[in-house]
Image (cartoon, grey):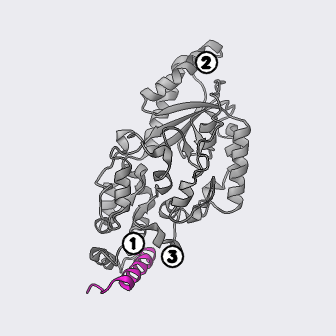
Amino acid sequence: MHKDADAFIQLTDRLAGWAVELGFSALGIAAVHGAELQDAHARYTDWIKEGRHGQMDYMARNADLRARPEGLLPDAQSVLSVTLAYWPEEGLARARAILAQPERAYVSRYALGRDYHKIMRRRLNALAQRMEGVVGAFAWRVCVDSAPVLEVAFARQGGLGWRGKHTLLLSRQGSFHFLGELYTNLPLPARPLQTSSHCGTCNRCLRACPTQAIVAPYVVDARRCIAYLTIEHPGSIPEALRPAMGNRIYGCDDCQLVCPWNHAVAPGDAVFFPRHGLDAATLSELMAWEERAFLDRLAGSPIRRIGHLRWLRNIAVALGNCASTHPDALRALKARADHPSALVREHVAWALARGERKAPHSLP
């Protein structure tokens, strides 16, 4: 690796432009250590001790590495943080309209298109290779949800925004973006720290959470979060939380939909626009997908990793929440009543009981 200071200055001046050329929305540079990182790690450690991570055991493993970047990349000196916008072109009105139609399936907007992990990793690899063309070979590591990283802290240190009360990274361009990191052993000058939060006294995200998972500003209890329950949670969804899930079958956007900084959010990268009609599908038609159809139609989608059984589990809950007013929901549930999986059967039975209890009459 060349140590010429002019080369690093030249590189830093070009990085933001390269990032945009490669399809990212913005890029920031942070030092590997600092007060923000230490404070964030202390909060994270407390969060783990309180058990708010639920059954996401991977979040507790190697937690110390989140404050020690050199444990992920020896001699790490700087971290490049990038954002990538994903919001679909139809805007906020479409998302709200789907939520208002209980017979339709609501999928978190980030998951309607291609899986962001592979896309961001490929683009970050390309960025690192461009950098090598200026300064020569150097040590680097790409992280896209693949290592213990305090990504919001690094993004904030790199000047990309501030931590919202829903815990996501917020900027004047909103919060509908993915985050990725490129760890390097280059002594790149850090960008100014984004010290100011622009949430003020607003608590809309806390009030909007259907399951009251945002238990305090900047604190989310994953055990109550619909995103956790529908994606990460492996077992039975707590019955007390099922009615509040509504028609949300994969993730939840409610805390972001009400955020004033997202009121005029621009469309993101077209690669994340809806595929296979997932932005308009009914719960009944999705419940009918057999495993082969699930795997084929969701190839290249982040949804695929939850597997067919969790998919049916989630849809069963949503069908139970609308079955009293939509006869097709009861039919779809009865078709799965004898499913081989005990997990699916349990949620279908709950949904049928809920629908038939509320319905003025049951279907034959």
Earlier in the chain: of badge 2 and badge 3, it is 2
Which amino acid does the dot numbered 1 rest on?
Ala
SS category of the residue bearing label 1: helix
Q: Is residue 47 magenta?
A: no
In the rendered image, is residue 136 in sight? no
Which amino acid does the dot numbered 3 rest on?
Glu
Q: Residue at x 32, y 76 (%)?
A: 325
Residue 175 vertical placement versus 73 (above, below)? below
Instruction: Kindly identify which numbered label has been placed on residue 8.
Output: 2
Q: Is residue 290 left or right of residue 12?
A: left
Q: Mark 2: few, some, or many residues within 10 Å (few <14, many ≥20)?
A: some
Residue where numbered disc 1 is placed: 316
Earlier in the chain: of badge 2 and badge 1, it is 2
Q: Mark 1: few, some, or many residues within 10 Å (few <14, many ≥20)?
A: many
Instruction: Kindly identify which numbered label has been placed on residue 174.
Output: none
Q: Residue at x 46, y 33 (%)?
A: 24
SS category of the residue bearing label 2: helix
Residue 175 vertical placement versus 345 (above, below)? above
The residue lying toward the viewer, choosing from 308 and 194, is 194
Q: Residue at x 60, y 16 (%)?
A: 9
Q: Tell me residue 161's x, y (percent).
A: 57, 38
The answer for how far apart the CA atoms under marks 2 and 3 are is 56 Å
Q: Tell me residue 193's x, y (percent).
A: 65, 33
Residue where numbered disc 3 is placed: 239
Magenta segment, which residues? 341-364
2 or 1: mark nearer the eye: 1
